[in-house]
């Protein structure tokens, strides 16, 4: 499913930003790129809202909508009244609850005495006493509090450790990946290029087999992340009070996912609460390990957990593990509300905040989404905290640079709501591919060339591709000529978003060949 995307605003948001600010906007990508399309669409054209939300909620993948936006916003146009955002607006707004799922659980799913799942499934949620998003002195006082998805903490406690999150969330567990070989595995070759650049935003329904994706770099990336933790500590991983339920739930969902997806490598002992990792040959006592540290030890991906403030219904960044950020880090953003995180983005408050907060307030648990953004990098900079010396590389076109050092960096992102705690979780991974790979990928060189040469300057600046272009453009031109000469692509092909996007024709064959399975 593609959602109409309005480039002009993004340009106006990013145009004229300094390098550091542009990189700050990467956060916009992580926290809001999912939403930019809808945000403007919803904010500006109320009559379109129903259509848009409908699209967001359609689960058909690649329904390929590319609506032409009815009109553009220009600075001259009348501004919508600025809302008083310090006033609670979403205190009464909740996502659709899924209490009916309780009826589908096996009869022993709820521990201890009390109503059965079937009985509980018929009760309406009582939102009058919401779970706080901060520390409480006595955890018993939480028991009758209700999460944004309509469960009381007492109910969540009765569900115990590792409840059936597939039923609870409405998003199935992944299928077992029997053929998978960790020694040769590669991530899918994400090439999220599109043209016209502004046409669509390529949001799609989460491909639930690929929420998390392991590859042959697993061991080294886990090691690298442990080192980053040693070096940066709570600048890269932290859980603020009020995020406990969400952190435990996320960890359990991740463990369930890994065990279902890669049964040859992972096993959970539900009685002892021990997680067996056959790749690293480790056992982790889940009862004695902080949930985010379980993720740190086993998952080479980033997570940001957004928790609802019960007074305002606004979400803030309360916990996470982030090791692939460029130009910002978790330490500088944790605890902030969505709007505060985006405060460097011009016009965010006037034009986006309302819709963004609203989207978070209502996001249904069973509608997870995914998308990719891309950039070109020298080598493979994964984590670049503010002020990192690597930033300087982006301000020069190094004459010594050779094409084999240039990589496509794709940040593949997913967004979903956790079913019990009601927290919203971003997950993302930074994936690097040498640009030389594009040589035999039909249409990809032409498509990137089109974007690099004709894409709006401001967007390209924001992507920070300039420092590689003196090397990449000639290489891609050569690949394009070769592809025409070899008959791989038509001579007069007019670059446009591929039907296979975010992949390319023949990607599966290449992917399987490279992995040997
Ligand atoms: C917004 O609302 C708050 C609380 O009701 C009030 O104190 C504040 O003055 C208002 N701000 C504006 C700009 O109206
Ligand atoms: C987990 O820890 C708690 C308290 O430390 C203990 O009471 C409980 O028995 C432990 N559970 C398991 C499965 O080890």
Image (tube, rainbow, N blue to C red):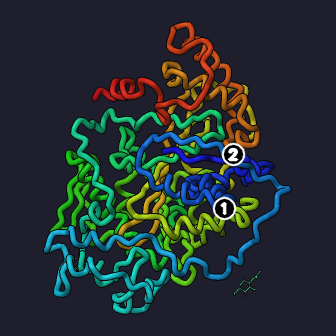
Badge 2 is on which residue? 7
Q: Is mark 2 within 8 Å of ligand 1?
A: no
Q: Which mark is residue 172?
A: none
Crowdedness near tag 1: few (<14), some (14–19) or many (≥20) residues, C-alpha within 10 Å: some
Does any portion of residue 84 appear in the rendered image?
A: yes
Direction from residue 377 to residue 499 in the image, left or right:
left
| Element type where label 2 sits in the image | helix
Return the disc, 1 or 2, that comes first in the chain's sequence.
2
Badge 1 is on which residue? 43
| Element type where label 1 sits in the image | helix
Q: At 58% across and 17% down in the image, what residue appears?
A: 479
- The image shows residue 132, relative to residue 304, as above or below, that is below
Does any portion of residue 411 appear in the rendered image?
A: no
Q: Quadrant of residue 353?
A: bottom right
Q: At 76% across and 59% down in the image, what residue appears?
A: 346
> Answer yes or no: do the residues labelled 1 and 2 have beta carbons within 8 Å?
no
Q: Quadrant of residue 449?
A: top right
- The image shows residue 268, relative to residue 458, as above or below, that is below
Q: Nearer the viewer, mark 1 or mark 2?
A: 1
Q: At 67% across and 24% down in the image, what residue appears?
A: 473
Q: Position of residue 130 (x, y in %)?
A: 44, 84
Quadrant housing the C terminus: top left
Q: Quadrant of ligand 1?
A: bottom right
Q: Position of residue 196 (x, y in %)?
A: 65, 34
Q: Nearer the viewer, residue 368 or 288?
A: 368
Q: Nearer the viewer, residue 499 or 164?
A: 499
């Amino acid at each position: 499913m593609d959602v109409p995307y309005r480039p002009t605003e993004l340009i106006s948001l990013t145009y004229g930003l300094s390098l550091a600010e542009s990189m700050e906007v990467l956060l916009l990508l992580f926290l809001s790129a999912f939403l930019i399309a809808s945000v403007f669409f919803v904010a500006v054209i109320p009559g379109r809202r129903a259509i848009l939300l409908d699209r967001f909620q359609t689960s058909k993948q690649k329904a390929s909508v590319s609506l032409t936006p009815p009109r553009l916003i220009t600075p001259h146009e009348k501004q919508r009244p600025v809302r008083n955002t310090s006033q609670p607006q979403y205190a009464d707004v909740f996502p659709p609850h899924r209490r009916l799922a309780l009826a589908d659980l096996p009869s022993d799913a709820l521990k201890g005495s009390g109503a059965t799942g079937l009985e509980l499934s018929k009760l309406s949620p009582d939102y009058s006493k919401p779970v706080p998003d901060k520390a409480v002195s006595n955890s018993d006082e939480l028991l009758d509090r209700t999460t944004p998805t309509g469960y009381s903490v007492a109910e969540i406690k009765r569900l115990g450790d590792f409840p059936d999150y597939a039923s609870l969330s409405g998003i199935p567990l992944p299928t077992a990946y029997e053929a998978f070989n960790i020694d040769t595995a590669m991530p899918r070759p994400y090439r999220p290029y599109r043209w016209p650049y502004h046409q669509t935003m390529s949001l799609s329904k989460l491909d639930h087999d690929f929420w998390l994706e392991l590859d042959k770099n697993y061991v080294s990336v886990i090691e690298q992340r442990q080192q980053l933790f040693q070096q940066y500590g709570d600048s890269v991983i932290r859980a603020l009070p009020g995020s406990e339920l969400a952190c435990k739930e996320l960890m359990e969902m991740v463990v369930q996912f890994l065990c279902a997806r890669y049964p040859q490598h992972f096993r959970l002992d539900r009685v002892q609460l021990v997680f067996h990792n056959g790749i690293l040959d480790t056992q982790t006592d889940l009862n004695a390990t902080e949930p985010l540290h379980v993720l740190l030890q086993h998952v080479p991906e980033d997570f940001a957990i957004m928790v609802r403030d019960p007074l305002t219904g606004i979400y803030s960044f309360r916990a996470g593990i982030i090791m692939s950020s460029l130009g910002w880090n978790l330490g500088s953003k944790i605890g902030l509300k969505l709007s505060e995180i985006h405060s460097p983005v011009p016009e965010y408050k006037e034009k986006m905040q309302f819709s963004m907060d609203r989207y978070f307030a209502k996001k249904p648990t069973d509608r997870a989404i995914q998308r990719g953004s891309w950039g070109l990098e020298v080598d493979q900079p994964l984590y670049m905290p503010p002020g990192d010396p690597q930033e300087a590389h982006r301000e020069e076109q190094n004459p010594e640079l050779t094409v084999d050092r240039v990589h496509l960096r794709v940040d593949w992102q997913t967004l979903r709501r956790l079913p019990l705690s009601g927290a919203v979780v971003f997950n993302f991974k930074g994936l690097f591919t040498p640009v030389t790979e594009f040589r035999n990928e039909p249409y990809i060189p032409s498509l990137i060339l089109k974007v690099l040469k004709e894409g709006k300057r401001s967007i390209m600046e924001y992507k920070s591709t300039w420092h590689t272009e003196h090397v990449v453009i000639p290489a891609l031109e050569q690949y394009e000529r070769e592809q025409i000469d070899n008959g791989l692509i038509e001579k007069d092909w007019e670059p446009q978003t591929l039907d296979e996007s975010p992949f390319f024709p023949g990607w599966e064959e290449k992917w399987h060949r490279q992995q040997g399975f």
